[in-house]
């Protein structure tokens, strides 16, 4: 399989750090997707391509949607109660989530049956556009959401955010 390191993530008691760790995993999976496209272009479809496609699909079908829900259902509404100034960027990010999910649906269909990839150049372009869209999206979230709110959320707000994230994943937190 092409490389996707398995890095330990912060716990739900550190929800902002966990969101950042998710961003890093997204970027790693995007980079691996681009490497996969190059591999398919050079080597065609082999077991390495199939295994890597399955890993990428698992991530973007399971973890990425949960991350988007963390933001859309919990983080963004919380931030709007703190600062109405964030409304514009939050609306932009929500729309980008929709666009990213639509782009992913196209890639997911191809990666589900890598043998169906007939035009490796077009697939490479599609992968590159998807990865760049995610890189741009994450940069906006980091610069305009996570960095400015660092230290602004109260302990009870962070605990509620962490509990909601844990519940979405069926996990327990140490908080009551």
Image: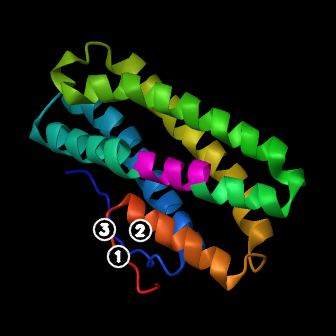
Q: Is residue 171 above or below residue 57?
A: below
- Label 3 Cα neighbours within 10 Å, binned few <14 / some 14-19 / many ≥20: few
Q: Nearer the viewer, residue 66 or 10?
A: 66
Of helix, strand and loop, which mostly describes the magenta segment?
Answer: helix
Magenta stretch contains residue 68: yes
Q: How many marks?
A: 3
Residue 19, disc: none
| Mark found first going from the N terminus, 2 or 3 | 3
| Mark found first going from the N terminus, 1 or 2 | 2
Regarding mark 3 in the picture, which secondary structure is present there? loop
- Pointers 1 and 2 in contact (C-beta within 8 Å): yes
Q: Quadrant of residue 76?
A: bottom right
Question: What stretch of residues is rendered in magenta?
Answer: 64-73
Task: Write the residue at 29% across / 40% down.
Answer: 57
Give me the C-alpha separation between circle 1 and circle 2: 6 Å
Marks 2 and 3: which is nearer the front? 2
The percent coordinates of residue 115 (x first, y second) are 16, 21
Residue 175 in the figure: left or right of residue 76: left
Residue 166, disc: 2
Q: Nearer the viewer, residue 85 or 31?
A: 85
The percent coordinates of residue 167 (x first, y second) are 40, 64
Regarding mark 1 in the picture, which secondary structure is present there? loop
Q: Which residue is mark 3?
A: 6
Residue 23 in the figure: left or right of residue 49: right
Magenta stretch contains residue 60: no
Q: Is residue 13 above or below residue 122?
A: below
The percent coordinates of residue 138 (x first, y second) are 62, 51
Q: Which residue is mark 1?
A: 172
């Amino acid at each position: 399989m092409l490389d996707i390191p398995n890095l330990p993530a912060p716990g739900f008691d550190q929800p902002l750090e966990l969101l950042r760790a998710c961003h890093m995993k997204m970027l790693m999976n995007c980079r691996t997707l681009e490497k996969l496209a190059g591999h398919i272009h050079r080597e065609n479809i082999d077991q390495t391509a199939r295994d890597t496609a399955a890993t990428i699909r698992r991530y973007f079908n399971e973890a990425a949607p949960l991350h988007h829900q963390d933001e859309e259902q919990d983080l963004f509404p919380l931030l709007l109660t703190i600062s109405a100034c964030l409304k514009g960027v939050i609306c932009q990010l929500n729309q980008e989530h929709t666009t990213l999910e639509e782009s992913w649906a196209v890639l997911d269909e191809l990666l589900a049956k890598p043998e169906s990839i007939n035009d490796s150049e077009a697939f490479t372009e599609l992968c590159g556009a998807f990865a760049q869209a995610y890189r741009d999206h994450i940069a906006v979230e980091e610069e305009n959401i996570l960095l400015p709110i660092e230290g602004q959320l109260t302990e009870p707000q962070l605990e509620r955010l962490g509990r909601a994230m844990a519940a979405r994943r069926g996990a327990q937190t140490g908080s009551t």
